[in-house]
Image (spheres, rainbow, N blue to C red):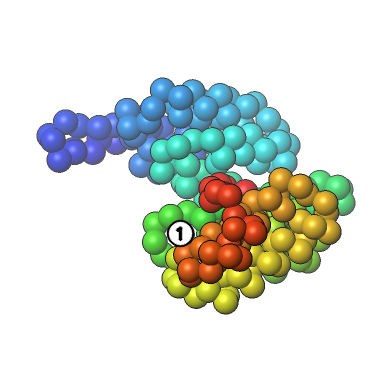
Amino acid sequence: MLLLSFNGVAQEFADKGYYLVDSLVLEDLSLADKEIIDSCLNEFHKETEDLWKIMALNEICYSVRHNDWSKYQFYQYELIKKTLNDRNDLAPSVKKELMLLLAEAINNIGLMYSDYGNNLMALEYYNKCLELRKRIGDKEGLTFTYNNMAYIYENQGLVSRSLKYYFLSLELQEEMQDTLGIAGSLNNIGHVYSTQGDKKQACLLYTSPSPRDRQ
């Protein structure tokens, strides 16, 4: 299928049978992104087990920098849900792994909406993610989602709500003795105090802002 771009040059969509998603224009991707996608899809099409097919998509969802990573995240999300719904023969360990992957996918979709400025949809997905991660006992995952929610509330100027979620993340990280996570949460909390003009409290906690990532 051809698409005529605004500069008059026809662009060809990649074969959906192989690349899985709609409207993927390979020429728009960097060489690094294309290599990641091709490598992962080679593994995807070789695998026969659903879990390994799903795992093969992870590197695309986490490493591709072009916005088309989100197409693969939605594809993986739907594939995980279908596998969990359709397969009654899954071993408990496989089902647990799929539930963890589902939570990651939901969190990443929330992050995608946050990056697009759609905070309402972002929070909807983050709350779904929180519910699932609490149910399966994914404490590490919860810290990421708490931080992502706090980030939205911080940008909205909802300071008390932002601090609530940063402190929830910190509490879990202290429980897990996650030294790097504790440092990141303290930085985030310190940044909130700093932007509110509470320099004394900020100096006790803050050294530099911690970037978010797909988690």
Give how far across and how far down residue 89 sits, in percent.
Answer: 83, 50
Please state, as top left, top right, bottom left or bottom right, where the N terminus lies in the image.
Answer: top left
Residue 12 drawn at (x, y percent)? 29, 31
Left or right, 44 with reference to 123: right
Q: Amino acid at mark 1?
A: Tyr
Relative to the observer, which residue lies in front, 166 or 145? 166
Residue 102, can we see it?
A: no
Residue visible at 18% across and 38% down in the picture: 4
Which picture quadrant has residue 139?
bottom right
Q: Quadrant of residue 82?
A: bottom right
**To which quarter of the image does residue 163 belong?**
bottom right
Identify the residue at image location x=87%, y=51%: 92
Residue ID for mark 1: 113
Q: Percent x, y for residue 100?
A: 73, 52
Residue 155 visible in the shown view: yes
Q: Is residue 14 left or right of residue 209?
A: left
In the rendered image, the vertical position of residue 113 relative to residue 54, given as above or below:
below
The residue most toward the left is 8
Residue at (58% x, 50% y) in the render: 207
Q: How many marks?
A: 1
Q: Residue at x 64, y 51 (%)?
A: 184
Vertical side of 213 occupied by 163: above or below: below
- Percent coordinates x, y for residue 179 in the rendering: 76, 47
Q: Mark 1 falls on what kind of element?
A: helix
In-image side of 86 versus 210 (left or right): right
* Mark 1 crowd level (few <14, some 14–19, many ≥20, 10 Å Cα): some
Q: Pick whichever, 64 or 196, lies toward us.
A: 196
